[in-house]
Image (cartoon, rainbow, N blue to C red):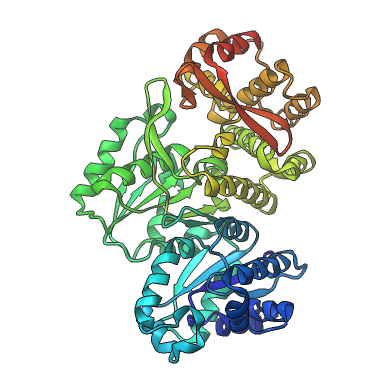
Amino acid sequence: MRRPLFLTGFMATGKSTIARKVADLSGRPYVDLDQQIEREAGVPVAQIFAERGEAEFRALERRCLAVELERREPAVVALGGGALLQRSVRLDVLDRAVLVVLEASAAEIVQRVGNAGSRPLLAGPDPLTRAQELLELRAPGYAEAHARLSTERRSPAELAQAVLAIWREDPLAVGAGEQSYAVEIGAGLIGRRLAAVAGSPSRVVLVSDQNVHGLHGAKASSALSNHTVETVVPEPGEENKHIGSIEPIWRAALASGADRKSLFVGLGGGVVTDMTGFAAATYMRGVPWIGVPSTLLAMVDASVGGKTGVDLGSAKNAVGAFHQPRHVLCDVELLQTETPRAYRSAIAEVVKTALIGDPSLLDLLETEHEAVLARSAEVVTEIVRRSIRVKARIVSEDQREQGKRAWLNLGHTVGHALESVGGYNRWLHGEAISLGLVAALGIGRALNKTPADLLARTQRVLELYQLPVSLKDEPLEAASRLIGHDKKRGGSKLRFVFAHAPGHVETEDLPLSQVEELTRGLA
């Protein structure tokens, strides 16, 4: 429990009661944020509202909340119902704490409140209508959390245990409005958590390629033994990531009687999770899905963000949809069966993530490279967690790649082109991205945007993991002709990602012809 636990929700959902019980169970400090605000202001909350207005109260609330995020010993904090209405504050809390929302219906809330006059926000002749209006207004905000728990027909003791279990799992969260979801990272999650996060769907469609199904399919099927499961096992490999491989998933789902209350589960690498997500996005015009990535690459890259799709010839991921998973389980035990080459290749995406938003991750890759290569569960869990945290933070701010999310494409413009020129079998995806990172930093160097020492350091880190860094013999002429297929192209311009320092990147629109010329010149 490395981060503080914040409990929020509408009034009368039991935030203070549950928070105290969790604090007692965990031995951690308990904090009521409203009481902190009253101590800061010197007057009761109701008086602050009456005399200074809600805006002044919210400003005080944000100051007190910031103090709790910085507390050395993580505490259990009961928030007021409107503490996270400002999205920038909510996303900061999602990143730096574990946030649980307690819920109840408007009728239940009014019954619990009793005398609505004691609650300024429900004051008026019709507290039920007012409660319904406020719940509707706050619904998008309450949806962005690590977990949401109904407090109706559940005892405080039961709820406290449930909240404590969530805190102990320490999930990460992707804020996506009503499509928000949690990502759990750890060992043994398939057996321990898959059934719980699956819930009670009418059917489960389990998609896993022939390789992964042979290794881990029985484990997943056992975890889902209380569900009606239809298993689809496509052929493995990027070359099979096309629209023709999606139809068998749709047909199997239809034949099994899967409806809109069904659940798709993708167990496999990035190809499988991309295909499963796309099949789920399009079946019955959209059904929920869960990602269970089985490779390091899928965990640090494809598991988060809701990008689903298939390739269209040489155009990678040219057909697809944004369709967020309902939950993601990154079970690091699965990585023990990954081939050494595939495992090492994924480090390129971790290096990319470090360059984008976590300089200390780059340090860890340098100092702990032996433990990383030995697949130490503790170290691997840390690099997966750090990578997902960076991506979750970016995706939460920019779900559809209108701004910062483009940073995640660092190294991918030339990397994808080289991968495609090689027919998706000369280089693994991560190996192509390793070359793409060298290319992107080389182009940045040529344009005086990337310092020489950053390029040299990045190459050294990639070489620690036996990843390719030399562009001398690469088919850059052929690759340059494919850069026009990049999804970041807009007309004759291409949005290119430059790295200035670890944790400091930016995008700039360059003429497509200039990027092609610079790519050819990298040889």
Q: Image height check: is 236 above or below 451?
A: below
At x 62%, y 74%, the residue is 52
Question: To which quarter of the image does residue 451 belong?
Answer: top right
Question: Residue farthest to the bottom?
Answer: 115
Q: Is residue 237 left or right of residue 157?
A: left
Identify the residue shown where x is 56% and y is 12%: 516
In the figure, residue 312 lies in which quadrant?
top left
Q: Quadrant of the N terminus?
A: bottom right
Quadrant of res 371: top right
Residue 438 image point, x, y percent: 67, 23
Quarter that holds the C terminus:
top right
Which of the pair 54/291 is nearer the observer?
Answer: 54
Q: Residue at x 65, y 49 (%)?
A: 386
Residue 144: give x, y in percent of width and height: 49, 60
Residue extending farthest to the front is 51
Q: Nearer the viewer, residue 35 or 367?
A: 35
Judge whether residue 327 can be spotted in this image: yes
Percent of width and height locating residue 201: 31, 62
* Rendering coords of residue 183 (x, y %): 53, 55
Q: Is residue 475 visible?
A: no
Query: Eyeballing the image, is 469 above or below 251?
Result: above
